[in-house]
Image (cartoon, rainbow, N blue to C red):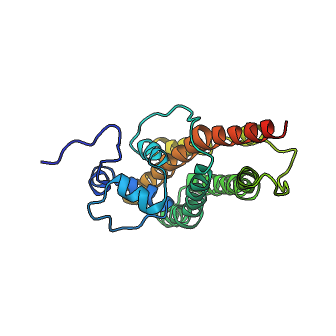
Amino acid sequence: MNKAMPQVFSPEHKLSKLIQHNSDLLFMLQHFNIHLPLQDKTIANICAAQNISEKLFITIANLYNNNSLSPVTDLPFTDANTLLLFLKNSHVFYSEELYPKILDTIEAMAKVNTHKEMVLVQKFFIDYFNEVTEHLAYENKIVFPYVLSLLKQIENPKAPNQSNSNYTVSEYKEHHNDIEEKLIDLKNLLIKYLPEQDDQTIRRKLFFKLSKLESDLAIHSNIEDLLLIPLVAKMENYLKDARK
């Protein structure tokens, strides 16, 4: 009999066993560039091999284990590199893997369900996809380069400041919205209102894919709000004090 899933992870836990309880952790590994097989390595083993801090890894893993999180303000500046790697990889996962699969499923469903409401499903998701793409592009082009520029200034104070001197993390915080919330309306459309037309199997598949997207986007937002933004604010304050 398998042991129950631990509520909170620790460095001694074997990652392979945790994944057997929660397969969503495979998505987390993908974002960290950690590949299978894992053998019987512990979280501590994996983090040491990948040069990832145990605290950061476990914090994110606990989010995938449906644990709540308060803002984390004691991460070292070097964790910014790992956070950016994770977030950039998640962007690729959304835009090149998950979104195209959802669009393919919607198009396949439209061939089965010809009700006029199906057009709303297609339009809603395409509009939503465009909004998310804009959000990810803003992070890739503005936020992430800004964070890297702060890190370079901290590591080499004599290096020229290449960041936008007028930009701060507070602007990012104002720009940052919960892009996963609108998926609830789309899921409700599938559950409550879209007329049936011999589409139950593919409708169920679409619902599960949308739920996976919603769940991962919620974790993505938490990582940005509770880990990245507090860390960047600390970097800004450090540089501000250093220039006094």
Tell which residue pokes out farthest to the left in this image: 1
Q: Is residue 164 left or right of residue 199?
A: right
Q: Is residue 116 above or below residue 69?
A: below
| Place of residue 53 in the rendered image (x, y in percent of width and height, measured from the top left) | 48, 50
Residue at 58% x, 50% y: name it. Answer: 79
Tell which residue pokes out farthest to the top in this image: 70
| Place of residue 128 in the rendered image (x, y in percent of width and height, measured from the top left) | 64, 52
Q: Is residue 110 above or below residue 125?
A: below
Residue at 64% x, 58% y: name it. Answer: 126
Tell which residue pokes out farthest to the right in this image: 166
| Place of residue 48 in the rendered image (x, y in percent of width and height, measured from the top left) | 42, 58
Q: Can the viewer see residue 199 in this picture?
A: no
Judging depth in this view, the residue of 235 and 3 nearest the camera is: 235
Q: Can the viewer see residue 183 in this picture?
A: yes
Residue at 36% x, 57% y: name it. Answer: 45
Q: State which quarter of the image contains the C terminus.
A: top right
Figure quadrant of residue 159: bottom right
Judging depth in this view, the residue of 140 and 207 nearest the camera is: 140
